[in-house]
Image: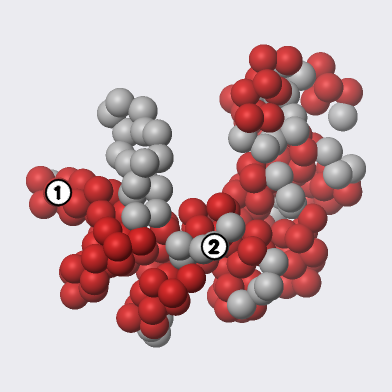
Amino acid sequence: MAELAALEDPKARQVNERHGDDHGVNLGRLRALAKRLKTQQDLACQLWQTGDTAARLLAILVCRPKEFARDELDVMLREARTPKVHEWLVNNVVKKNPHAEELRVAWSADPDPVVASAGWALTTERVARKPEGLDLAGLLDVIEAEMKGAPDRLQWAMNNCLAQIGIDHAEHRARAIDIGERLAVLKDYPTSPGCTSPYAPTWIAEMVRRQQDR
C-alpha cells in the first residue's frame, strides 16, 4: 500500500476522476509493479479487501482468475463501483473463470444496472467468441426495447452488444443497423481523430469494411 501511495500522481488522478475513477496511479506503472510481484492469490485477496481502487486494480493483475468461487465474484462485482475496477474485473477475471456463463445469465437479469452491464459485457464476449446457443434475435428485441432509456453504463454495454451482433453475424446486420439508426444512441458521442465512433451503425460499417479488406 505504501508503494502504491508513492506512485500517486495528481495529474493522473485528475484525468481518472473525470471518468469516475478515484485513483491517481499511472496504469503503466501499476502493470510494472504487478509484473514484479507475479501471481499471488493471497496477496490479491488482501489487496481487494482494502477497498482502495488502485489496490483493487493491482489485485486483479496478480490474482488467479480460475480460483474464485461464483459467489466470491458476485460479491466482488457488486463492490466494484468505479468503472475501471468493474471493467478490469469482468475482462481480466470473470471471463477467465469457469462460472462466467452462470454469472452472465444471473447478472443480465439483475435489477442493478451496473451489475446488469457486466452481464451484457459477458454476452458481447459470447456473441463474438461462442455464439452457439444464444438467441441473437431475442437479444436484439431486448436492446430495441430497453437501450434508449437505460442508465449510461448499461446503455454502453448494450450498445457494444448491438454492434458486435451486427459486425459478426451478417444475417442480423441489417436489423442491428436499423435499431442503431432509430435509437440514435451515442450518435453524437465525441470521437478522437482516427478512432471509430461508438455509434453502432458507424462502428458496424467500419469493422465490416476492415474484415473485407483483409
| Vertical position of residue 29 compared to residue 46: above or below | above
Q: Dot 2: few (<14), some (14–19), or many (≥20) neighbours within 10 Å?
A: some
Residue shown at 64% from the left, 45% from the top: 83
Q: Which quarter of the rendered picture does the N terminus lie within?
A: top right
Residue 99 appears anywhere in the view: no
Residue under label 1, please give it: 209
Mark 1 falls on what kind of element? helix
Q: Earlier in the sequence, mark 2 or mark 1?
A: 2
Badge nearest the viewer, 2 or 1 = 2
Mark pair 2, 1: CA separation: 29 Å
Callout 2–callout 1 Cβ contact below 8 Å = no
Quarter of image, res 108: bottom right
Query: Residue 52 in the image: x percent, y percent?
Result: 83, 38
Q: Amino acid at mark 2?
A: Ala
| Vertical position of residue 111 compared to residue 33: above or below | below
Give me the disc on residue 59.
none
The tally of labels here is 2
Residue under label 2, please give it: 150
Mark 2 falls on what kind of element? loop
Residue shown at 69% from the left, 36% from the top: 21
